[in-house]
Amino acid sequence: MSRPFILILLIAIFLISCGWYQLDFQNYVRQLLHTCLVTTNHEEPSTRESVPPSPPPKTKLQVEVDAMFDQIQKLIPNSTFMHFNQTTSGRNSVAFIVQARKTYCIGEELVVQLDMFDYLGKKKTYGGDFIRPRLYSGELGASVSGIVKDLMNGSYHVHFPLYWSGKAKVNILLFYPSEGVAALWRSRHSSQGFIGFQGKFEKFGAVAVTNCNFKLTEEDGKEICEYRDATSEEVFYCYKAPNFTCESLNEMRGYDRLASYLTPSESQIFQRSNIAVEIAGNIPTITVTRCRASTEEPKPKCKTGMGSPFPSGYFYNYTWNPTYCNMTSYKTGGDFMRCLQGKKLYLIGDSTLRQFMMHFTEGIQIVKYFRYHLRGWTSWALTLEAMNMEKDIYVSYKRHGFPLDHASFYYFKEDLYTSQQIDRHAGGKDTIIVVTMGQHFRQFPLKIFIQRAINIRRAVERLLLRSPDTKVIIKTENTREITAAVEKRGDFHGYTQYLVLREVFQGINVGFVDAWDMTVASATAAVHPPGYTFASIMSLTFTFAC
């Protein structure tokens, strides 16, 4: 084959190939140009505002916390404060017995109606007042809480179950009007809390102090240390001290921020003369008799897992009588030693459980402190241990962890949340764990308390799965001094927390000590209940334990 022929053949093949791929080539170029043009024409201007990232989905815990919070919030009145004179006045309000009779029978109910009026003498047309009722007999050492039914029209029915024969008097206090309740709820959720915190960082003898809290705002030049527990989702923050590591945080203290979120007019509601005012009325002393032979079935001994109704009991002869079970009365050191011999008792909470430790060591003296040589409330936040070597009794008191309303620096490294402490216990038939919380949470938004309560319940459930013989007792918080700062530590905040605990621990195999009900019934106004009220709290606790 000649050379010219081969050359002509190659040229022909090239031309045929170009024709064959021409369409695909053109389409490729056309698509490339189109893509470039579209990208250019739709390029966003550099001044476009960035779209904030969507928040991460809520965890199961956060969903449960929010649901519980919403449940409590529905109970809060939507009362708009206009003027002090238009708020509920306890002195102008009236109380009277519905369908009054000469005598009443044990087992019946006494119903008292309240009609609420403002300071101008005008009938209120809506409810939401914070009312505390009790029926009592000083001669018999008897008392019981009442059940308030809000008729939502400015009137209430208060139901008193009649448990004893003899005389009884009605005592109903208006603690805060509905306008005050709404203001306290708003105030509580207007900040991170009325208590601020300072953390002390230490390294090789050097010390630095910075601010800490559940949330911190970013500030120029300041790093933030995060202290998070992954299991409980509990978290707080401290500003990092320069030249210190986050791990060198060693001590913590609380301080009063001296903040208020009430208006001057709202503050007038909470002057002492306007708090806990008795609602007047022509209510005579009533007479209760045993009208028929008792047909009551015998009650079982109080044990863990029993539901606690409201009222959960009543005082008679200055002793608590649960309505649903029989309580053993613990009075002497011998009574408690028979219960605690061979056992380990862990008290986790606040100073109302430190009161238990003081009773054992300084009161009935059944155990002796280990490496603690002080008395009374001195250094109350310390972890304490006490023992009786002969009877093989071990008692421990430990605070519930952050937050703690304590003005002096305390050793922070030994702090654990209550749920963490419970998780570290093996449990067993000779282990008793008593838990309380409340007084140190009143200064903070309610969700913080709700989350802590749910985490404790989860830890208790884990404990009872691996060690079902462990005795766990939940003690609610109790009422406190009427003179306590209402916005920060008032009993309305405690009441909402009490409702949370009742709900969270339903259906759990724990003993539920309703210290709130006890202190309302006995009209105790002390953060550390005295006398027969404290004795009954102790007796019910250790009836569940033993």
Image (spheres, rainbow, N blue to C red):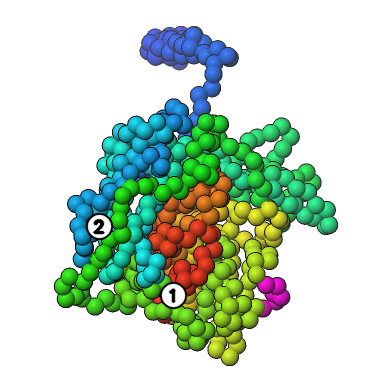
Q: Which residue is mark 2?
A: 110
What is the chief secondary structure element of the magenta stretch?
loop
Residue at horizontal 37 percent and vertical 68 percent from the top: 142
Label 1 sits on what residue type?
Answer: Ser
Where does the image place residue 241, in percent across and percent down from the top left? 75, 45
| Count of marks, rendered view | 2
Residue situated furthest bottom in the rendering: 390
Which of disc 2 and disc 1 is earlier in sequence? 2
Quarter residue 1 falls in = top left
Q: Which residue is mark 1?
A: 539
Q: Secondary structure at mark 2?
A: strand
Where does the image place residue 370, in percent across and percent down from the top left? 67, 78
Front residue of this view, candidates 109 and 249: 109
Q: Is residue 148 above or below residue 378?
A: above
- Any part of residue 64 in sight: no
User: Split into 4 quadrants, where in the image is the C terminus?
Assistant: bottom left
Residue at horizontal 77 percent and vertical 55 percent from the top: 202
Quarter residue 359 falls in = bottom right
Q: Is residue 51 left or right of residue 286?
A: right
Where does the image place residue 81, in percent across and percent down from the top left? 44, 30
- How many C-alpha atoms fall within 10 Å of the one at disc 2: few (<14), some, or many (≥20)? many
Front residue of this view, candidates 162 and 414: 162
Q: Secondary structure at mark 1?
A: helix
The residue stretch that appears in magenta: 370-375
Label 2 sits on what residue type?
Answer: Leu
Q: Is residue 474 above or below residue 132?
A: below
